[in-house]
Amino acid sequence: MNHFLDIHTTDAADLRSMIDTARAMKTARAGLPKGTPDADQPLKGRMVALIFEKPSTRTRVSFDVGARQLGAETMVLSGKEMQLGHGETIADTARVLSRYVDLIMIRTFEEQTLLEMAEHATVPVINGLTNRTHPCQIMADVLTYEEHRGPIAGRKVVWSGDGNNVCASFLHAAGQFGFDFTFTGPPTLDPEAAWLDFARSKGVRAEIVRDPALAFEGADLVVTDTWVSMHDPESAKERRHNQLRAYQVNEALMAHAKPDALFMHCLPAHRNDEATSAVMDGPHSVIFDEAENRLHAQKAVMRWCLGV
Ligand code: CP
Ligand code: NVA
């Protein structure tokens, strides 16, 4: 069963082939109205369930549109409105949904929910974000980097800010796609040591540099994300902002990166907190290509899951 649960647990050659498929599919439908079905309909006759236990704009719309372009029917479900949100077990939910649908994408809180869904479903399950990782986002980010600058292998990626779920999947991708990764942020918000070790085990450099100006030196790609994630308590906001202010991505810090460095943010952003509008709307930024590429990358992920 091809579940797409995380980048570090998916075969590296399969990940590469998904990026290449995504790029080819994007090129093949360039300029067509968004509602035009793809020429190939590999998901024709399939039913896709998209479950959200947290808010979403990009994941929700890009999966829905992408599945339809591939010929599938879709349903978007809110965790709160399902029996799942009222005490039915994940295992029973997985068994029941597997009788109705061919593919399940879930955005949830605890990673354990995703893993239980995958364990008990008899159809593929896709991770649409947990508190711990966000693999679909980084598939889109790798696609975006390579469209603009060629192979990401051997490049230097700098993450500035919170070592969160998106950062974790970036570290997994560093190992699987072969690029170097520098984290810069406060020690209290470091990424999990296991993820740095994973990247290193694949032979790439994965390091922590506290001084952001030093960290940005020679960066090919600078990435950040919100300072307060959906699973973080609102009460932590002020403390996090105080700890993270020095890691705001602004023009002064970007000047330390390579002149042709790209800037990414998975969005939604809090403008002028984690990144200034000057950077988000400036010459390095590819944030809206990233958002678009969620669509193309996830179409390749869905095809891989279903083997079509
Ligand atoms: N980047 C991302 O996953 O956005 P949404 O929360 O809008 O889905
Ligand atoms: N780190 C953010 C990503 C949102 C797409 C969160 O988990 O809220």
Image (spheres, grey):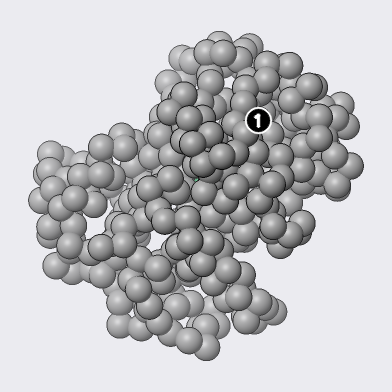
Residue 171: percent from left, percent from top:
54, 38
Left or right, 74 with reference to 162: left
| Between 173 and 201, the one nearer to me in the picture | 201
Q: Residue at (67%, 52%) from the top-left corner?
A: 152
Residue 273: percent from left, percent from top:
69, 26
Q: Is residue 288 visible?
A: no
Q: Is residue 121 depicted above or below 210 in this figure?
A: below
Q: Would you identify the image quadrant in which residue 223 lies?
A: top right
Q: Would you identify the image quadrant in which residue 216 lies?
A: top right
Q: Report the residue marked by disc 1.
A: 182
| Between 295 and 79, the one nearer to me in the picture | 295
Left or right, 96 with reference to 196: left
Q: Is residue 283 depicted above or below 72 in this figure?
A: above
Q: Residue at (48%, 77%) from the top-left corner?
A: 69
Q: What element carries label 1?
A: strand
Viewport quadrant of the N terminus: bottom left
Q: Residue at (48%, 86%) from the top-left corner?
A: 40
| Between 153 and 67, the one nearer to me in the picture | 153
Residue 84: percent from left, percent from top:
18, 45
Tell me if mark 1 has few (under 14), some (14-19) or many (20+) residues whose alpha carbon lies within 10 angstroms of its own. Answer: many
For this orientation, the residue located farthest to the bottom is 39
Residue type pointed to by label 1: Thr
Residue 147: percent from left, percent from top:
71, 62
| Between 202 and 282, the one nearer to me in the picture | 202
Q: Would you identify the image quadrant in which residue 89 lies?
A: top left
Viewport quadrant of the C terminus: bottom left
